[in-house]
Image: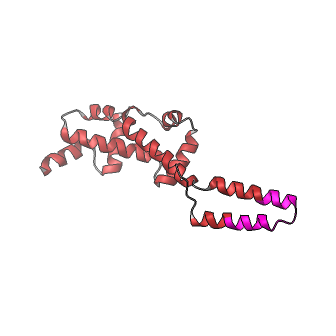
């Protein structure tokens, strides 16, 4: 992937190049060169993080029913759950658990609308281990219980 530094990053690198050219001695030269290399290493890091988060999003969308914890996602990507949560929140502006629950509830809404499955079966199919927790999350996101949602969809038709 091609990494393109932002204008600010380019300006910072140019300033460091000028400082390298004006260095009075070896120590100052080495310090400025180190700063330039560090700045270059940071170029494009946001793009790399965004690609990484896109891969995590794809993973969640494809495996939401099997995901029981954030730790399980972190293990799939060989990172700590704290690092994963921080990077995800920075890129997506929602927490990882909020996103995961949104995906699960979106799918639960479809099952409630287009199937006759019991609420407990829908909860299980969407990766919730507890019907009570499923109902709480569903109500928090949609403003109504799964049963109320199913009734409201059926009366709208």
| Residue 84 found in image quarter | top right
The answer to whether residue 133 is visible is no
Rendered location of residue 24, percent (x, y) = 86, 66
Rendered location of residue 94, percent (x, y) = 45, 52
Residue farthest to the right, as pictured: 25
- Whether residue 115 appears in magenta in the rendering, the answer is no
Q: Which residue is at a point 65% across and 56% down the rendered structure image?
A: 40
- Whether residue 15 appears in magenta in the rendering, the answer is yes
Say left or right for 23 vs 1. right
Foreground pick, 52 / 33: 33
Magenta-drawn stretch, dominant element (helix, strand or loop):
helix
Color encoding of the figure: secondary structure
Say left or right for 141 vs 46. left
The answer to whether residue 110 is visible is yes
Count of numbered labels shown in the rendering: 0
Q: Which residue is at a point 36% across and 34% down the rendered structure image?
A: 65
Say left or right for 135 vs 87. left
| Residue 126 found in image quarter | top left
Foreground pick, 25 / 154: 25
Q: Which residue is at a point 76% across and 55% down the rendered structure image?
A: 34
Rendered location of residue 103, percent (x, y) = 36, 44
Foreground pick, 4 / 91: 4
Residue farthest to the front, as pictured: 21
Rendered location of residue 81, percent (x, y) = 55, 40
Bounds of the magenta span? 14-32
Say left or right for 146 vs 43. left
């Amino acid at each position: 992937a091609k990494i393109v530094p932002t204008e600010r990053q380019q300006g910072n690198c140019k300033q460091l190049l000028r400082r390298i050219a004006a260095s009075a001695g070896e120590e100052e030269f080495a310090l400025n060169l180190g700063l330039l290399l560090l700045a270059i290493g940071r170029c494009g890091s946001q793009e790399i993080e965004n690609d990484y988060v896109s891969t995590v999003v794809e993973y969640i969308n494809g495996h939401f029913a099997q995901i029981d914890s954030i730790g399980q996602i972190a293990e799939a990507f060989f990172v700590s759950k704290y690092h994963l949560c921080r990077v995800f929140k920075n890129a997506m502006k929602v927490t990882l658990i909020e996103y995961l629950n949104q995906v699960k509830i979106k799918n639960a809404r479809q099952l409630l609308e287009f199937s006759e499955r019991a609420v407990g079966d829908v909860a299980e199919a969407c990766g919730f281990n507890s019907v009570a927790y499923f109902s709480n999350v569903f109500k928090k996101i949609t403003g109504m219980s799964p049963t109320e949602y199913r009734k409201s969809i059926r009366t709208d038709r």
